[in-house]
Image (spheres, helix red, strand yellow):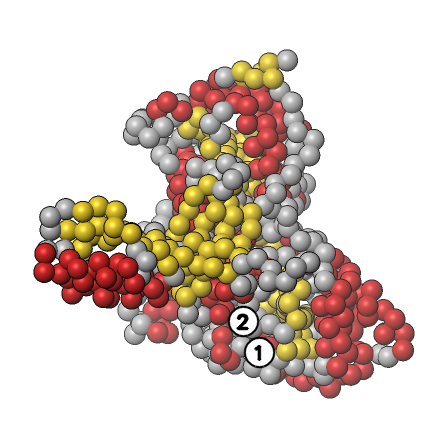
Amino acid sequence: MLRTLSVLVENEPAVLSRVSGLFSGRGFNIESLNVAPTLDKNISLMTIVTDGEEQIVEQIIKQLRKLITVIKVVDMNEVNCVEREMVLLKVNAVEDYRAEILRIVDIFRCKVVDVSPAELCLEATGDKDKIDALINLLQRFGIKEIARTGAVAMRRGLQTER
Amino acid sequence: MKLNGAQILLESLKQEEVDTIFGFPGGSVIGLYHELSNYSFNHYLVRHEQGAVHGADGYARATGKAGVVFVTSGPGATNTVTGLATAFMDSVPLVVFSGQVPTQLIGNDAFQEVDIVGISRPCTKHNYLVKEIKDLAKVVKEAFYIARSGRPGPVLVDLPKDVMAAEYEFSYPKKVHIRSYNPNYEPNTKQVRKAVDLISKAEKPLIFAGGGVITGGAHEELTWLARELQIPVTASMMGLGGFPGNDPLWLGMLGMHGTYAANMAVNSTDLMISVGVRFDDRATGKLETFAPEAKLIHVDIDPTSIRKNVNVDIPIVSDCRRALQALRNELTPILQNENLADNYASWRERVKGWSEENPLTYKPSETSIKPQQVVEKLYELTQGEAIVTTEVGQNQMWAAQHFLYHKPRSWISSGGLGTMGYGFPAAIGAQIAYPDKLVIDIAGDGSIQMNIQELATAVCYGLPVKIIILNNTYLGMVRQWQDLFYDKNYCATCMDQSPDFVKLAQAYGAEGYFLDKPGDIDEVLTKAINSKNTVIVEVAVEKEENVYPMVPAGAGLNQMLLV
């Protein structure tokens, strides 16, 4: 089962290699890994999507917490969260298909970010299932290039007023 | 006052109450060594950097203090890797300072440049590259704090040459605060109560002690628990010395070369009280059949140790000593009303039966010396009043089985990594820590040759380490596996071209003795033990003696091969 972990780390040079090295050294999977600084420039947020049995994920979380430069680990599957990733796609868009592709763009609420005579460059955000569905639909036109960010996630706000 | 980086480092070491350093100089650390001559540290110049790290490791295991190492960049740094990995696996506090090329050359493939921070990342608890002189004192403070606290471990600090030469105002931080590192020492009271509840309901409890009992200084509390409740005790190899080896409740070590009684007890216990262990495969055998009838209490300071290999009923993340103290506090009032020890009486009888049925044994010979016999004789002559280090292999297992360890830190051996060549430099470190104690390295002819160069170090500093080489002319443990599981195909395990160890000892300025007659063991070992010098005793032992009992790799602990 895929699990999304939000990992707050000290923003220092070797921190990515400490985290990625932990995964490779212990044979844990990384489905995707996303990292960028937070509002506090000294702290970065890593969003790691991993795959494994319950006991493995427990061990991954503990091992991450054991790293000296890791400040906090949240298992996003344990909390109510919003999860999104972004994808850029360059699709074959010759005259015959162009209208159909644009309909799909509309339905999926994507953006066209670049146009050329034979190609469209699309930007889409959504959860993994939505992105997978979009890619699936566009594949028959021919996807020339793809760049996915991997997921980022955030805990939802409380639904009741305090 | 402004000091240069080298002076700041040395002043910081003084603040950390370091007095002993193991090291080997080189281009990147000449400046550091230049300043070192103005300080009163006891610096031990080794003959190979691996010897420095194992030496510091032996010193640390013997004393509980952090071991300190200086090495140069490049090969000096890479030579520390085996030592770091050894210390990391066995939770030994070390701080290794490695020289590095000047910061402006880093990444340029400069002479003697290596990315030691990258290389050592998976075999250190943490590591640092100090890029700016202003960070140096703080990094040293953090390095010692991380090495010593929580589950201890080695920390490496990489020091570029220009940083060591730069000047800065020295002020040593009084406190250290790392927001992302806060080890938990206190046991959770609820968990402790649940553990007590299980103990009071158990019929066949067993205590399983590990290295955490030694590291955490929990031996007295553990001994109280065992004796007060009359619970039999076994230990992993790392836990030897955590409970007196001459106590009637002591079953001997468990695991691959554990005693019959210990392994059968594991197989039948209904409550395993495991303290400071990590359920290593050499201790558990096949996990599916490990302690099949038992509920498990697991105390360890490292949360990753818990539920890594085995499922646990009552996990207690805590310092071992404090957890056992909490157990004692909860148990004391119960014991006033109920003598729990009585509940386990028939269990103790059963365990005793196993001990009598199949004690540790070997077949003595009139013509050749049995290795077990040598270890037994060493015990008899010393009554356990010695620090024993070992190499790795058969020598290590016989030393673990046939010598009884009564005190913590009297047994020093590479458990997790199984590093051949560890024992002799570790013995040097232990001897430096305790000049007046008897320090014995029980070695094999294979592993002693992996760091034999340290004879020069031992002789140079007048360290009276006793090296007992059980010479069977084989890489014995591998040969034993070939014998039992690989059709006796002794490929690459025969070492009949070893040097004359007596002459070798003499060449280095040590004493050397050769022993091949069973009748001479007493006399020669006595002479060696009483010597004030570094001594090698080469013992020609029975060549194809195997270590028993043995649980084949991947088998359950109840599937032992006996003699």
Q: Is residue B439 above or below residue A63?
A: above
Q: Work out whether residue B455 or residue A49 is closer to the camera in this orientation and state it.
A: A49
Residue B291, numbered label: 1
Snapshot quadrant of residue B78: top left
Q: Which image quadrant is residue B334 in?
A: bottom right
Give the image location of residue B114, x and y in percent: 36, 34
Q: For numbered disc 2, what is the local secondary structure?
A: loop
- Above-or-below relation of B158 to A100: above
B96 versus B473 height, above or below: above
Number of numbered discs present?
A: 2
Which numbered disc, 2 or 1, marks the residue closer to the eye?
Answer: 2
Q: Which residue is mark 2?
A: B310
Q: Residue at x 61, y 43 (%)?
A: B179
The image shows residue B250 at horizontal and vertical percentages of 68, 70
Q: Secondary structure at mark 1?
A: loop
Residue drawn at (46%, 33%) of the image? B129
**Image position of B166 with respect to A55: above or below:** above
Q: From the viewer's side, name the closer residue of A134 and B236.
A: A134
**Marks 2 & 1, CB-CB < 8 Å contact:** yes
Note whether residue A78 is visible.
Answer: yes
- Which of the chains bears the disc numbered 1? B
Q: Quadrant of the N terminus of chain A?
A: bottom left
Q: CA distance from mark 2 to mark 1?
A: 10 Å
* Amino acid identity at mark 2: Val
Asked if residue B39 can be seen in this view, the reply is: no
Chain under disc 2:
B
Residue type indicated by callout 1: Ala
